[in-house]
Image (cartoon, rainbow, N blue to C red):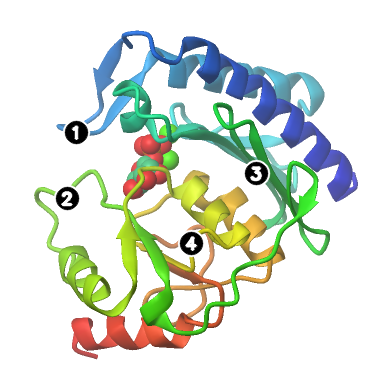
């Protein structure tokens, strides 16, 4: 199966799921708590059921890892990795920043991905080696080369109230060294915004494969760069990531090293 056909399917699936999010948006949502502040709505579940149903019907032998249900394991080299609603907290509060993320890997390597924001009707797509696009227009990261002019983004994990990680320390240091920071609540969109040049740098410490698979491919295909926060190689199964336009990567790593005392 070629990457372009996989992408076409990912794109149509993200668009269909996005319609489920859009048509239910603004209503009072039925909220279930997975943790003190980690929630899931009926709409996350409806979106996931739709996406998994489509994948099962078209590719019955493929594996599927989706956030809200146990993994469908398979001997197939293809595995779909799905976030049916990235930005659930925003969605539940009627804050208009959320998306659907659908990615697929072949032998563990991400090959195609689509991230769809159904309110702005922005469809971000990429295939490995085939470039990244926003509604069909080719994407490229920003050319900002000085951290002091960089608009940065981050997020805080659901265990923020008990976690001993240093994200508050990093946040404080980047407030002082970057131009400004946004914390918008959708890691997949953060990565896509980096790919478009709206953001110049992004870091987060406890992400999951469904948060990053599609956004990371889109970022890389737009010329961006991602490593772990200690500078070692990143892949979507690692929890922490530093992603940038490439040009300010070294400067951000330097700040992180200073804070981490490395
Ligand atoms: C969350 C969002 C958020 C990030 C969290 C993620 P969810 O995903 O991407 O921006 O800070 O780490 O868990 O729960 O809305 O799908
Ligand atoms: Ca997510
Ligand atoms: Ca989610």
- Tell me which numbered mark, 2 or 3, is placed earlier along the sequence: 3
Asked if one can make out residue 205 in the rendered structure from this viewpoint, the answer is: no
**Inter-mark Cα distance, 4 to 3:** 22 Å
Q: Secondary structure at mark 2?
A: loop
Residue behind mark 1 = 37
Q: Is residue 59 left or right of residue 238?
A: right
Eyeballing the image, is 216 above or below 143? above
In whole angstroms, how far apart are the C-alphas of marks 1 and 4? 27 Å
**Label 4 vs 3, first from the N-terminus:** 3
Q: Look at 52% across and 77% down and name the residue there.
A: 233
Which comes sooner in the sequence, label 1 or label 2?
1
Q: Say what secondary structure mark 4 lies in.
A: loop
Q: Looking at the picture, how far across and down is residue 170, in whole percent?
A: 23, 71
Where disc 1 sits, the SS reads: loop
> How packed is label 2: few (under 14 Cα within 10 Å), some, or many (20 or more)?
few
Residue at the location (26% across, 49% down)? 157
Secondary structure beneath label 3: strand
User: For ligand 1, which image quadrant applies?
Assistant: top left
Rendered view: 207 above or below 148: above
Pointer 1 with pointer 4, Cβ within 8 A: no
The residue tagged 2 is 160
When the figure is inspected, residue 118 is found, relative to residue 102, above or below; the finding is: above
Residue ID for mark 4: 199
Spot occupied by residue 246 in the image (x, y as percentages of width and height): 56, 79
Do callouts 1 and 2 mark residues in contact (Cβ within 8 Å)?
yes
Q: Is mark 3 within 8 Å of ligand 2?
A: no
For label 3, count other residues whose C-alpha is less than 10 Å away and answer few (under 14), some (14-19) or many (20+): many
Query: Would residue 36 appear left or right of 180 to someone viewing this image?
Result: left
Which class describes the residues within 10 Å of circle 1: few (<14), some (14-19), or many (20+)? few
- Asked if the residue at label 1 sits under 8 Å from ligand 1, the reply is no
Nearer the observer: mark 4 or 3; the answer is 4
> Residue 103's mark?
3
């Amino acid at each position: 199966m070629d990457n372009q056909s996989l992408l076409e399917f990912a794109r149509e699936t993200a668009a269909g799921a996005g319609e489920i999010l859009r048509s239910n948006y603004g209503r009072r949502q039925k909220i279930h708590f997975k943790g003190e502040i980690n929630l899931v709505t009926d709409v996350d579940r409806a979106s996931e059921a739709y996406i998994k149903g489509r994948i099962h019907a078209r590719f019955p032998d493929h594996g599927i890892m989706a956030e809200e249900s146990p993994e469908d394991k398979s001997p197939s080299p293809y595995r779909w990795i799905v976030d049916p609603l990235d930005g659930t907290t925003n969605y539940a509060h009627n804050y208009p920043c959320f998306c659907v993320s659908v990615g697929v890997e072949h032998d563990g390597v991400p090959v195609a991905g689509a991230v769809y924001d159904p309110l702005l009707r922005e469809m971000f797509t990429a295939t490995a080696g085939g470039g990244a696009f926003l509604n069909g227009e080719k994407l490229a990261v920003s050319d900002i080369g000085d951290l002091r002019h960089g608009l940065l983004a981050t997020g805080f994990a659901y265990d923020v109230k008990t976690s001993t990680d240093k994200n508050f320390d990093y946040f404080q240091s980047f407030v002082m060294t970057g131009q400004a920071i946004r914390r918008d609540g959708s890691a997949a969109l953060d990565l896509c915004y980096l790919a478009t040049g709206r953001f110049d740098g992004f870091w987060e410490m406890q992400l999951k494969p469904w948060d990053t698979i599609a956004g990371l491919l889109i970022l890389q295909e737009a010329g961006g760069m991602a490593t772990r926060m200690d500078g070692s190689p990143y892949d979507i199964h690692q929890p922490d990531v530093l992603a940038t336009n490439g040009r300010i990567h070294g400067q951000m790593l330097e700040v992180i090293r200073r804070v981490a005392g490395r």
